[in-house]
Image: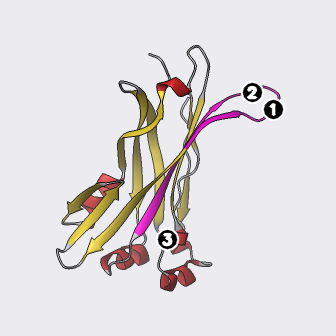
Amino acid sequence: MLFSTTVLAGNSSMIIRSASLVATDDSYALNADLDMKFSEKMEQAISKGFELNFLIEFQLAKPRQYWFDDEVVTVTNRVTLSYHALSRQFLVIRGDQQKAFVRLDEATDDLSEISDLKLFQKSEVEKGEHYKAALLIRLDPRKLPKVVQGDTIGSDDWKMSSQRFEWVPSLFK
């Protein structure tokens, strides 16, 4: 069963539409599809050269009946969106990979698709066990410039986060 909700803040929104784990040779990777919309203030800040850092937080747990779930894997990845004024391009940076786009909507489309993000090794999970996966994606306000951090206090324009998206992955298939 897939579960998703959204937090709408100001005119910003982020909805996780789908997420799945895919087996590679020796690991599992995340594929996810999002709907993202920036508030007008966020779009202006990006166009002025401010970086927006997003955290992709993934957790894999083994459910327990009478106690807290047993956390198997917790992974946090950072994705950065910025505007480079000299080249007039929007940049999306994932780890050591950088993509450039002419328009903000193109960069947002790329940001909205997570594909083949390696999360954990196959050896970290046991065959025959049942697991629960959870995904949360949010803007990291601590990485905003100090000038903007003051504006974020009490402002809905800068609150951008998905709700926790949970599913039961099909591992070992």
Q: Position of residue 4 (x, y in %)?
A: 54, 43
Highlighted range, magenta: 52-74
Q: Residue at x 56, y 47 (%)?
A: 5
Q: Which mark is residue 64?
A: 2
Vertical placement of residue 127 versus 154, above or below = above
Say which quadrant the N terminus sits in: top right
Which is nearer the N-term, disc 3 or disc 2? 2
Q: Using the rendered image of the protein, determine whether residue 131 is visible from the camera's viewpoint.
A: yes
Q: Nearer the viewer, mark 3 or mark 2?
A: 3
Kindly identify which residue carries mark 3.
Answer: 143
Kindly identify which residue carries mark 1.
Answer: 67
Q: Secondary structure at mark 3?
A: helix
- Give the Cα distance between marks 1 and 3: 35 Å
Q: Secondary structure at mark 1?
A: loop
- Give the Cα distance between marks 3 and 2: 36 Å
Decide whether residue 64 is among the magenta residues: yes
Q: Are marks 3 and 2 in contact (CB under 8 Å)?
A: no
Answer with the quarter of the image where residue 46 lies.
bottom left
Q: Is residue 54 left or right of residue 142?
A: left
Q: Secondary structure at mark 2?
A: loop
Q: Amino acid at mark 2?
A: Arg
- Give the Cα distance between marks 1 and 2: 6 Å
Q: Residue at x 56, y 84 (%)?
A: 150
Decide whether residue 163 is among the magenta residues: no
